[in-house]
Image (tube, grey):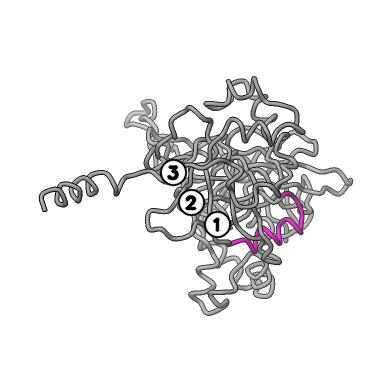
């Protein structure tokens, strides 16, 4: 009895916190089917950073050519499962780079602007975005008092007034696409002369993100099981008199900057161009930036297996937890359709160098600046 009690006590002390066992990469489901197409390009981009994230400085020195990448991964990495605390399946969602139409100057009243970051947007000591206001002039004409900080206006307040007049970066033809570009955080704008302008996340107003699909379900406008980007866009365009109020239920407002041209994807939080189907956004509290991962999920269009290596090169406000990833599907309408459909159960493994201790969760992230505000 005493031995049994001792064993039980030992299990209570250690079994609950025991780490899942790692496995060799060739034991991952579908490992042999992944061609790794595009992965070498994604890794080469992060290896080209002035200071690649740890432990990549040493790994980059030994990065082989693309045709030898699979053998190199199998010889040098081990797969550690990333799991939810409650044992439920993880979640794979998607995002993309929209391609929309617009102009550098306003051409008609129906256009919606994307704004540059305003000069009165500042960050507090805790990273919170605030609005800086000059102090009131003191009695007798003395110099104004020190500036004061207040919460930055919401989406509704920004759109109702002229707070950002003169900060327009570009004018988009479709206000609904402008709203969704705020959600995605970057995109390409087709201009009238046929050229393309790349725009990307620069900052946001510090207000919380609210998914408007939840508002449409609450109104009875959409059934809970049919909420995706296409359904939301269709409803907004069919109800122009209500669309602005629904979009303003999301108080977060994103500010943009013009990005260099070229065919590369938008930059992620890691500072490198995202690679379609290989770059993912994850929670930096659980997944080290730049880390390799293996996902076991399904495609949202036909249900076929989606099992492949990805690399954590981005993050988003809605991407939280260990078993959570947001896959970058690429640019344009088809990528947008698939990203909008993606809400797939998933298993995920961290691919970590052999001989290095597995990194432990860092705890809750503190409102990091991300390349985009949220997913979906």
Picture layout, residue 101 above or below residue 118: below
Residue 346: give its label: 1
CA–CA distance in space, label 3 to label 2: 16 Å
Total numbered labels: 3
Distance in Å between CA atoms under marks 2 and 1: 8 Å
Q: Mark 2 — residue?
A: 323
Q: What is the CA distance from the residue labelled 3 to the residue labelled 1?
A: 19 Å
Residue 340 magenta? yes
Choose the circle earlier in sequence order: 3 or 1: 3
* Identity of the residue drawn at 86% across and 49% down: 192
Is-magenta flag for residue 339? yes
Left or right: residue 171 compared with residue 370: right
Place of residue 330 in the rendered image (x, y in percent of width and height, measured from the top left): 72, 49
Asked if the residues shown at circle 2 and circle 1 are in contact, with their CB atoms under 8 angstroms apart, the answer is yes
Marks 3 and 2, the one that precedes in the sequence: 3
Q: Nearer the viewer, mark 3 or mark 1?
A: 3
Of callouts 2 and 1, the N-terminal one: 2
Residue 52, image x, y percentages: 59, 25
Where, by quadrant of the figure, is residue 244 drawn? bottom right
Query: Crowding near pointer 2: few (<14 within 10 Å), some, many (20+)?
Result: many
Q: Is residue 14 left or right of residue 76?
A: left
Give left or right: position of 178 versus 213: right
Whole-percent x, y for residue 9 in the image: 18, 48
For the view shown, which residue lies furthest in the bottom direction? 220
Q: Badge 3 is on which residue?
A: 21
Q: Residue 240 appears at what percent x and percent y?
A: 66, 71
The image quadrant of residue 230 is bottom right
């Amino acid at each position: 009895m005493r031995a049994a009690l001792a064993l039980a006590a030992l299990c209570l002390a250690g079994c609950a916190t025991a780490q899942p066992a790692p496995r060799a990469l060739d034991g991952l489901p579908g490992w042999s089917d992944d061609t790794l197409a595009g992965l070498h390009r994604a890794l080469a981009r992060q290896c080209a950073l002035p200071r690649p994230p740890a432990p990549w400085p040493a790994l980059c020195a030994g990065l082989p050519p693309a045709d030898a990448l699979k053998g190199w991964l199998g010889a040098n990495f081990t797969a550690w499962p990333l799991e939810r605390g409650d044992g439920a399946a993880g979640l794979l969602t998607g995002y993309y780079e929209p391609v929309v139409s617009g102009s550098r100057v306003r051409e008609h009243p129906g256009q919606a602007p994307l704004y540059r970051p305003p000069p009165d947007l500042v960050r507090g000591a805790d990273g919170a975005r605030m609005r800086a206001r000059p102090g009131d002039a003191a009695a007798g004409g003395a110099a104004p008092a020190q500036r004061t900080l207040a919460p930055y206006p919401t989406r509704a307040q920004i759109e109702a007034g002229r707070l950002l007049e003169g900060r327009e970066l570009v004018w988009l033809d479709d206000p609904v696409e402008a709203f969704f570009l705020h959600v995605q955080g970057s995109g390409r704008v087709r201009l009238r002369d046929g050229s393309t302008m790349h725009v990307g996340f620069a900052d946001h107003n510090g207000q919380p993100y609210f998914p408007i699909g939840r508002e449409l379900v609450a109104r009875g406008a959409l059934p809970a099981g049919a909420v995706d980007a296409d359904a939301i866009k269709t409803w907004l365009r069919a109800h122009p008199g209500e669309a602005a109020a629904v979009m303003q239920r999301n108080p977060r407002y994103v500010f943009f900057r013009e990005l260099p041209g070229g065919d590369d994807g938008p930059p992620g939080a890691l500072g490198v161009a995202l690679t379609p189907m290989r770059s993912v956004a994850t929670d930096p509290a659980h997944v080290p930036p730049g880390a390799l991962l293996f996902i076991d999920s399904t495609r949202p269009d036909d249900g076929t297996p989606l099992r492949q290596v990805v690399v954590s090169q981005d993050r988003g406000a809605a991407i939280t937890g260990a078993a959570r990833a947001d896959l970058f599907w690429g640019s344009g309408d088809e990528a947008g359709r698939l990203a909008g459909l993606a809400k797939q159960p998933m298993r995920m493994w961290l691919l970590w160098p052999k001989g290095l201790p597995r990194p432990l969760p860092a705890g809750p992230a503190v409102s990091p600046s991300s390349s985009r505000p949220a997913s979906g």
